[in-house]
Amino acid sequence: MIAVDTSAMVAYLTGDLGADLQPIDEGLSDGTVALPPVVLTELLSDPGRSPALGPMITALPRLEILPGYWIRAAATRSKLLARNLRTRMADTLICQSCLDHGVPLLTRDRDFRHFERYAGLKLI
């Protein structure tokens, strides 16, 4: 199982090319791609999204929020803030979903490198 963040999913859905997007294609075929809840929300709230993509996006497996998620997310974000690192709330919540489920994250967003280094997030 892999999680996909918004930057990678948007790139894939708009037809961007790149070896980094190959795991999405493979994961959609074999059912091993999952979306963190925040990514689902970001994708569905994009006013420029084609309405035809809605059913496909909502049909994808999700990383459900587990008990204690919000407290763990706060602790994860606090670790990075203590180092004066950039930590967007949405990125923190995506990271925590991946950590809770033990899945790596496929992303094109370099901000996640801090979560990889200081919080244990695995990146693809």
Image: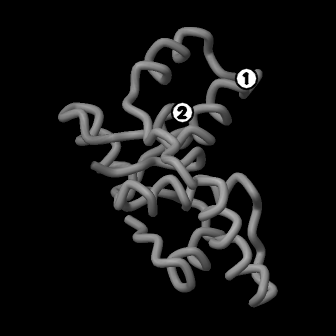
Q: Does residue 23 appear to the left or right of 113 in the view shown?
A: left
* Residue at image mark 1: 48
**Residue 67 percent coordinates (x, y):** 52, 48
Q: How is the image coloured?
A: one colour
Depicted 103 relative to depicted 60: above or below: below
- x then y, percent, for residue 61: 37, 31
Indicate the amino acid at tag 1.
Gly
Q: Is mark 1 on a helix, strand or loop?
A: loop
The answer to which image quadrant residue 82 occupies is bottom right
Q: Which of 67 and 110 is in front in this view?
A: 67
The three-letter amino acid code for the residue at tag 2 is: Thr
The dot on residue 14 is 2
Location of residue 37 (image quadrant): top right
| Residue ranking furthest to the bottom | 83
Disc number lying in front (1 or 2) = 1
Task: Residue 124: give x, y in percent of width and height.
Answer: 38, 65
Please report whichever mark, 1 or 2, sits nearer to the chain's N-terminal start. 2
State the residue at coordinates (59%, 69%).
112
Against 47, residue 24 (above or below) is below
* Element class at badge 2: loop
> How far from the left and from the top, in percent, is residue 30?
18, 35
Decide: few, some or many residues near mark 1? Use Cα within 10 Å; few <14, some 14-19, many ≥20: few
Residue 76 left/right relative to 58: right
Classify mark 2: residues with Cα within 10 Å, few (<14), some (14-19) or many (20+).
few
Quadrant housing residue 71:
bottom right
